[in-house]
Image (cartoon, rainbow, N blue to C red):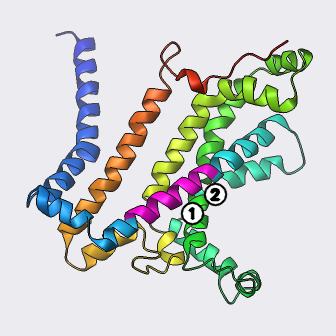
Amino acid sequence: MTGHTLTRLALRSATVGYVLCLIVLPLAGIGWQSFADGWGRFIDDILQPQAQAALVLTLQAALITTCVNAVFGTLSAWVLVRFDFPGRAFLNALVDLPFAIPTLVAGIMIAAVYGATSPLGAWLQRGGIEVLYNVPGIVLAMLFVTMPFTIRALQPVLMELEQDQEEAAYTLGATPWQAFWRVTVPSILPGLLTGVFLTFVRALGEFGSVVIVAGNIPLKTQVAAVYVYGEIESYNPQGATSVSVVVLLFCFLALMLLERLIRPPGERLPAFLIGKPVPS
């Protein structure tokens, strides 16, 4: 073997070993523990009323979070790329703040703003809106930790997108909304889909901020990650790993769908996702 061949083999072996140690082996371990007592025990674990309620609440909150971030993340990325205004650099830096601070601190921040002792929290409670220890608090926590994903996925795409196509659409009589939906969206769709799906899978597994604001009330405000933690503390690792496998399955299917949707041109996007040309 030549030195070049040995180097390539060493690099490939190191990469495969790295992935095996950090991803494949832990996945195999949790899968083995989940099915150690057979399929019957696994089904019984995920069909427990408390486990079902936690999974359903997690999916609902993650979907709401994804939809909100898809809209406001797209608008935020558009504003940060297309407009120049005082404080833009500061605002752009703030977008990365959820990446930098611990999620537990994020939960404490939300509790400080929306708690019953804060002016805003007290005002909302007088209006019959309870944020903490309720679904709105869970969604707010997920929104905070997932906010950067859509924005950061779209910004590079928008920076590379030429505006001449949009201007041509205006020349042909398109309204700003038509130009955005039929010209801009198809061009940025791979980046948008990436941000949306990453938001969804990140929200599914959120723990640190949610455990502060949700209150961990079984059958009401207990999300899957908090349920898993509770089962570990209750010395029921089998039940914890069974629910964890379900969450992992949702994440894996979402990422597989993302890979399917953002394939190279020619087989990348379904026809119904591609905008039609602006009529003249």
At numbered mark 1, what does the secondary structure look like: helix, strand or loop?
loop
Q: Which residues are magenta?
A: 55-67
- Residue 101 marker: 1
Q: State yes or no: discs 2 and 1 in contact (Cβ < 8 Å).
A: yes
Residue at the bottom extreme? Answer: 117
Q: Is residue 83 above or below residue 5?
A: below
Which residue type does callout 2 highlight? Answer: Leu
Residue at (74%, 87%) from the top-left corner?
126
Disc 2 designates what residue?
Answer: 97
Would residue 224 be seen by someone viewing this image from the given angle? no
Q: Quadrant of residue 124?
A: bottom right
Residue 216 is inside the magenta segment: no
- The answer to which of 276 and 106 lies nearer the viewer is 276
Q: Position of residue 252 (x, y in %)?
A: 35, 43
Q: Which quadrant of the figure contains the C terminus? A: top right
At numbered mark 2, what does the secondary structure look like: helix, strand or loop?
helix
Residue at the left extreme? Answer: 37
Q: Position of residue 133 (x, y in %)?
A: 54, 80
- The answer to which of 156 and 195 lies nearer the viewer is 195
Residue at (13%, 55%) from the top-left corner?
39
Q: Is residue 61 left or right of residue 70?
A: left
Q: Is residue 195 above or below residue 175?
A: below
Q: Position of residue 220 (x, y in %)?
A: 46, 76
Crowding around mark 2 (Cα neighbors within 10 Å: few <14, some 14 to 19, many 20+) is: some
